[in-house]
Image: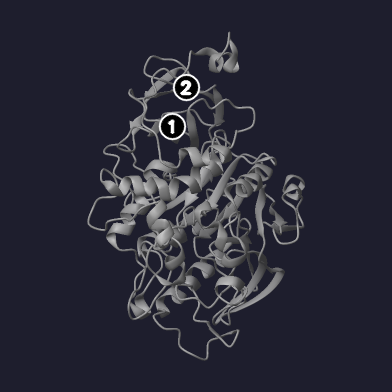
Amino acid sequence: MTGTTRREALRGGAGLAAVSMLGTPWMEAQAATRPAGGNFDAGAVEHLLPTISHDRLRLKASFERGLSDAPRLRVGSETFTGRQSDTDGRFWQWDVRGLRADRRYKLRLLNGRGRNLTEPWTIKTFPAPTASPDRLRLLIFTCAGGHDLFREFQLFQPVKVRNRLLRRALSFNPDAAIANGDHVYFDLEAGAAGAIQGGSDLAHRRVGRFDPLLPAVGSANEKVLKRAAGPQIVPLYGTECRSVPMFFLTDDHDYFENDEASDQQITFPPPWWKLQLARATQRMYYPEFIPVKGQPDGLPFMTSGGTKRGLSECFGALRFGRLLEFLMYDVRRTMTLAGPSGVFIDNRVEQWITNRLRARDVNHVVNMPSNPMGWSAGKWAEWYPDILDNGQLTESKPKPYWQTGWLSQHDRILNAVSARKRGAPLVIGGDIHATAAATVTRTGDTDLRDNPVQLALSGTLGTDKNTFPSGFRGTPPRKPGHLDIAEQITPLEENGFTIADFTPEAITLRFFRWNSQTQPQSDIDKLEPFHTLEIKSAG
């Protein structure tokens, strides 16, 4: 740094004196792909991922090296000391309460001596639950993970490409973004995915082996976890989303496994040690859900907050005044193998969902399960009984290990969505590596034509040739026999994302696509929507 350069000493501080010399094995390899975050000078910060409500901020951050003193976050006129998330002092988190609704705050990240670690940035809280905002824009995508270590297998787009897609999506200035599942791909044991990913000799040599008998953090597993998950998350997001509230919903690969079932192994619900890997990844890299109005305190995997409300790991919502409540729920963690009484989501979570669908204090209530409704690839842990036979989906043969209770829960939720006569009935899914849209008018024996439900698949940032359903499963996503649906977009196995605009009168979805097999990467920078869909409010 010469004179007063380095962005005028990070715009008001002398910088990075409190950084120690603890490095990471993958840091040098990732230096060339670390996103710049536009013109933002991140200093020694590697990534910043915030989430927010109307009165609370949650922030996760990592640094190139461990910090000898706890960093501090200045929010407006108040300062909050970071809480360490790992053993080496590279990962830190903040939980800031008591903020004012609908207000833009200036944030400064400081070292132990009060000097800037980055240049300042801003973030805006959401409107109060009783406010009546007239519009909101969300960015929605799925399956953004993937380790560049496995590039030769064409499983995932290189992290540079994923970052480029993210930057194009952010250029449409969303008010918040939702990443629906599969932030990490490092399958360890089951099936072909485990054999070529985390269970491969290549992964063992370059990343290491997890020991199921050791804790995820504070043991040798921690270093393996950072080498496995870090290169999939840190260079993708960097500081690009520092001012964009992020909502991360987990799905199967975030538990370091694919959803597989055989006489030798059933991968879900996840065993304890893989659950701990997923929780440790969230603890270090991306924020939990901040509970919102109408969300019970006792949902599964909701941390205790003592006299104050805690955080929710896998069931949460984005609440934007009276305009929108966007419900997000992981179907893997609490799924049961109990036949007719089996569920994907815990019964208490289902009750919360149906209660919110009956609520009158919000206009739109959108549902987002991590496993999509509307389409099937014939795999085990889907809502539907369809199985792949000679290249076609059929219900004429039993699907091994599939539980009839899963479909019953699916029908209860879809019926509740259709029964709501306020706002636009919409369910958005991820997981299945595609972009699609359809209207469902029947589920099982129930006629939904009085208020058809709109279904959508948001598009994937990370999928490459061999992990699209046609490459990995032998079929594109198809309509299951249990539903009557009319497709506006037949499932596309391409990369993309969705921009969703909400007003009291309608939800407008704009779908974006990019084909890595036929288009140059430069086309990403000028992507425009190829399809626009308006869903009008009922009532």
Amino acid type assigned to the residue bearing label 1 in the image: Phe
Counting labels gives 2
Residue 112 location, x and y as percent?
36, 18
> Is residue 363 in sight in this rendering?
no
**Amino acid identity at mark 2:** Leu
Instruction: Report crowding for label 1: few under 14, some 14 to 19, many 20 or more residues within 10 A (C-alpha).
Output: many
Q: Is residue 18 above or below residue 337?
A: above
Left or right of 274 on screen, residue 443:
right
- Which quadrant does the N terminus fall into? top right
Q: Among all residues in the image, which is located at the extreme top?
A: 3
Give how far apart the Cα atoms at labels 2 and 1 are: 10 Å
Q: Tell me if residue 181 comes above or below residue 36 in the rendering.
A: below
Mark 1 element type: strand
- Residue 345 lies in quadrant: bottom left
The residue indicated by pointer 2 is 117
What number is the disc on residue 297?
none
Q: What scheme was used to colour the molecule?
A: one colour
- How far from the left and from the top, in percent, is residue 529? 75, 53
Q: Position of residue 490 (x, y in %)?
A: 70, 70
Residue at 42% in and 29% down: 98
Q: Is residue 74 left or right of residue 392?
A: left
Front residue of this view, candidates 63 and 430: 63
Find residue 504 and report its horizontal and vertical position in percent: 66, 48
Circles 2 and 1, Cβ within 8 Å, touching? The answer is yes
Check the picture and name the quadrant holding the C terminus.
bottom right
Q: Earlier in the sequence, mark 2 or mark 1?
A: 1
Find disc 1 in the rendering and name its residue: 63
